[in-house]
């Protein structure tokens, strides 16, 4: 469904909330894994990272459902067909990755036998039994899917900025209405 005139306030809020939380979780993920040893600070940061990731997953689910129900505006008039296809492909991949990246993190934690206690309050269920082979596979899967997502986000953001300021077709303003 690509029939709306513009993104609504909920779609815009969810886009930026998920984006900001992903930037924070990504930076924290890189920082915390670089801390040597197993210090209390490192364990605390791992917990915060997991809480952020679980929150991102929940918001991403809401986002995908909202998108399914509400659709999105048609691409800016005059956009070449290959760019329309590339943007649609990137958007589909991003929707997939904002669900799969937290899932790989969660399954990795379960495989490693470390529970997720959301906000230190809710003991979340382990989705799989501790398993060394899966643990060894899920760790690089979480890492490399993160790098894939980061690469797509860089191109996605660069395309939005290029369309806004070079083509002047208002693409970025669709997600940042104050630019209109
Ligand atoms: C969109 C959400 C998420 C993002 C952007 C993200 C990002 C990252 C990044 C960049 C790293 C460092 C990769 C490395 O160098 O190994 C990392 C590591 C890690 N993440 Fe996530 N993550 C997310 C969700 C989650 C979730 C939901 C969990 C678990 C509930 C989780 C658990 C972990 C763990 C345990 C590590 C450490 C892996 C290691 O020991 O090297 N992450 N994450
Ligand atoms: C983790 C970061 C991000 C993710 C996961 C993400 C994801 C997405 C997705 C899935 C859409 C498609 C919305 C739809 O049509 O249903 C979208 C649209 C959009 N995003 Fe992002 N985004 C991120 C960051 C950014 C950044 C940093 C910018 C700008 C600098 C940006 C600008 C836009 C714009 C302008 C649109 C609307 C495109 C159009 O209408 O054709 N996004 N984003």
Image (spheres, rainbow, N blue to C red):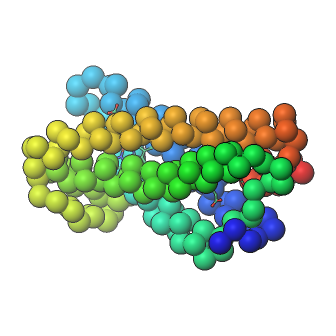
Extreme residue toward the front, this view: 81
Q: Residue at x 65, y 72 (%)?
A: 1
Where residue 66 appears, as percent x and y from the top left, is: 59, 71
Of 98 and 121, nearer the camera is 98
Residue 162 vertical position relative to residue 74 in the rendered view, above or below: above
Where residue 5 appears, as percent x and y from the top left, is: 81, 68
Q: Is residue 18 left or right of residue 3?
A: left
Where residue 44 appears, as percent x and y from the top left, is: 34, 42
Residue 40 can be seen, yes or no: no
Residue 167 vertical position relative to residue 74 in the rendered view, above or below: above
> Which quarter of the figure has residue 9?
bottom right
Q: Residue at x 24, y 49 (%)?
A: 109
> Which quarter of the figure has residue 4?
bottom right
Q: Residue at x 27, y 36 (%)?
A: 140
Extreme residue toward the top, this view: 36
Q: Is residue 139 left or right of residue 159?
A: left
Residue 59 vertical position relative to residue 77 in the rendered view, above or below: below
Q: Is residue 53 left or right of residue 171?
A: left
């Amino acid at each position: 469904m690509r029939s709306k005139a513009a993104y609504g306030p909920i779609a815009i809020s969810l886009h930026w909330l998920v984006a900001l939380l992903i930037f924070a979780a990504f930076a924290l993920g890189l920082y915390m894994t670089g801390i040597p040893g197993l210090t209390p600070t490192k364990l605390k940061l791992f917990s915060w990272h997991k809480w952020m990731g679980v929150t991102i997953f929940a918001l991403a689910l809401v986002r995908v459902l909202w998108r399914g129900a509400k659709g999105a505006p048609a691409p800016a008039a005059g956009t070449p067909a290959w760019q329309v296809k590339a943007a649609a492909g990137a958007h589909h991949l991003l929707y997939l990755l904002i669900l799969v990246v937290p899932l790989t993190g969660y399954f990795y934690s379960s495989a490693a036998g470390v529970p997720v206690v959301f906000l230190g309050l809710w003991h979340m269920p382990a989705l799989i039994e501790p398993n060394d082979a899966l643990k060894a596979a899920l760790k690089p899967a979480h890492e490399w899917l993160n790098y894939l997502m980061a690469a797509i986000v860089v191109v996605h953001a660069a395309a939005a900025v290029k369309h806004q300021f070079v083509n002047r077709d208002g693409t970025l303003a669709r997600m940042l209405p104050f630019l209109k």
